Amino acid sequence: MARRGVETGFILDRQWHWLRGEMERTKRPALLLAARLLNEAAVPYAIIDGVALQVHQPEPRTTPDIDLAVPALDQIPRARLEGAGLRLTGRFAHSENWIGPEETPVQFTDDRALSHAIARAEEIEVEGTRLRVIRRADLLHEKLRSGSDPARRRSKRLQDFADAQALLEADPGLAAELTPEERALLDRLPR
């Protein structure tokens, strides 16, 4: 299921660009390249957010970018990324934004709340490349945390809560992983 979800995401990428009247493209080259470069540099990481949702939920999902959690921004193998053709587009307090093949946005974050999730990341293989993906339970916690962040746009927070609910619907056993605060948060959502 995990690999199939990512492959479905690549198909959705092409269709999304095609429907917008653009050349068909996909984040496949950027995702595989970033993973190979991080693996070669022995940088711990976890794929998070939309691509992780493609891996962990059965419903098809598209996302225009790649989000990667790393323990510290200074561990990003910048010279390798640049040598492979990625371009740095911005640096912020806890993230760096890059553009990869096929103009795919790639964002690295060193959010300390994700450090344990990075260490527990699961591996899947796509085209001979190991991809480290945040575990389903960690993704659930992260979606609830992001949805609770008042600094995020409301539309993003609502999407985070919808993603969390979809993860629980796909795997009801995840409810055992919820803290009392997370349960209360979900209970306040419209039914």
Image: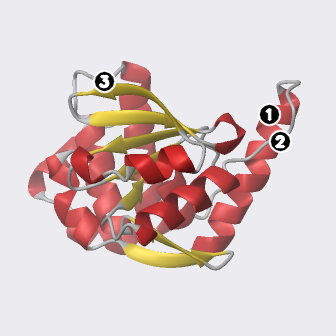
Could you tell me how far apart the alpha carbons at marks 3 and 1 are, in whole angstroms? 26 Å
Taking 46 as reference, is 19 left or right? right
Q: Determine whether label 2 and label 1 are within 8 Å by CB.
A: yes
Q: Residue at point 20% right, 50% down?
A: 72
Residue identified by numbered label 1: 17
How many residues crowd around disc 2 within 10 Å: few (fewer than 14), some, or many (20 or more)? some
Q: Which residue is mark 3?
A: 152
Question: Does 128 sit above or below residue 167?
Answer: below
Disc 2 versus disc 1: distance between alpha carbons? 5 Å
Question: What amino acid is labelled 3 in the image?
Answer: Arg
From the top left corner, tell me how far across and down residue 13 is, in percent.
74, 44
Label 1 is placed on what type of residue? His
Residue shown at the point (59%, 58%) measured from the top left = 33
Pick the front one: 37 or 112: 37
Residue underneath mark 2: 15
Report the front residue among 86 and 129: 86
Q: Is residue 28 above or below residue 103?
A: below
Q: Is residue 191 visible?
A: no
- Amino acid type indicated by mark 2: Gln
Q: Quadrant of the N terminus?
A: bottom right
